[in-house]
Amino acid sequence: MRVWEVRVSCKEGNLLSFKILIDETGTIVTELSGVPENYLHKLFKDGELMLIRKILKEARPKLEGLHDYLENELDAMVFTT
């Protein structure tokens, strides 16, 4: 694993995340969230901005695909049970 260092003024922030949650009623939900693309320039500059944009450009479609896939699978299970 390679660690990239990016200077930030806060300790931690959610750039992009994917969660599978279950609530108190047993409902399973998938959640995809992250910082909006048009806000990145306020957080990062120059090379750091380019790096973060590249990471998000590569990761977002894959997580969106997983999100859609699981949502469809869960919906299909609900209709067949």
Image (spheres, grey):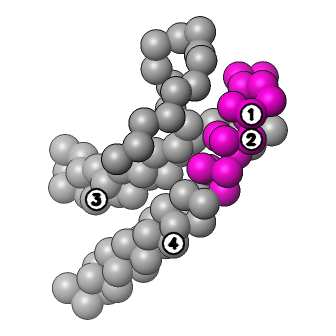
Task: Give the labeled residue for mark 2.
Answer: 50
Instruction: Identify the residue shown where x is 26% and y is 57%.
Output: 27
Q: Answer yes or no: do the residues labelled 2 and 1 have beta carbons within 8 Å?
A: yes
Q: How far apart are marks 4 and 2 (CA)?
A: 23 Å
Q: Quadrant of residue 7?
A: top right
Residue 78 horizontal side relative to residue 41, left or right: left
Q: How far apart are marks 3 and 1 (CA)?
A: 39 Å
Instruction: Identify the residue shown where x is 74% and y is 41%.
Output: 50
Q: Answer yes or no: do the residues labelled 3 and 1 have beta carbons within 8 Å?
A: no
Amino acid beneath label 1: Gly
Callout 2 crowding tier (Cα within 10 Å): few <14, some 14–19, many ≥20: few
User: Which secondary structure lies at badge 1?
Assistant: helix
Task: Give the labeled residue for mark 1.
Answer: 47
Query: Looking at the image, is 15 positioned above or below residue 43?
Result: below
Tell me if residue 47 is in the magenta stretch: yes
Task: Give the labeled residue for mark 4.
Answer: 65
- Of labels 2 and 3, earlier in sequence is 3
Task: Give the labeled residue for mark 3.
Answer: 28
Q: Answer yes or no: do the residues labelled 4 and 1 have beta carbons within 8 Å?
A: no
Tell me if residue 56 is in the magenta stretch: yes
Amino acid beneath label 4: Gly
Q: Distance between the residues labelled 4 and 1?
A: 28 Å
- Of labels 4 and 2, earlier in sequence is 2
User: Which secondary structure lies at badge 3?
Assistant: strand
Nearer the observer, 36 or 53:
53
**Mark closer to the observer (3, 4):** 4
Query: Looking at the image, is 44 positioned above or below residue 69?
Result: above
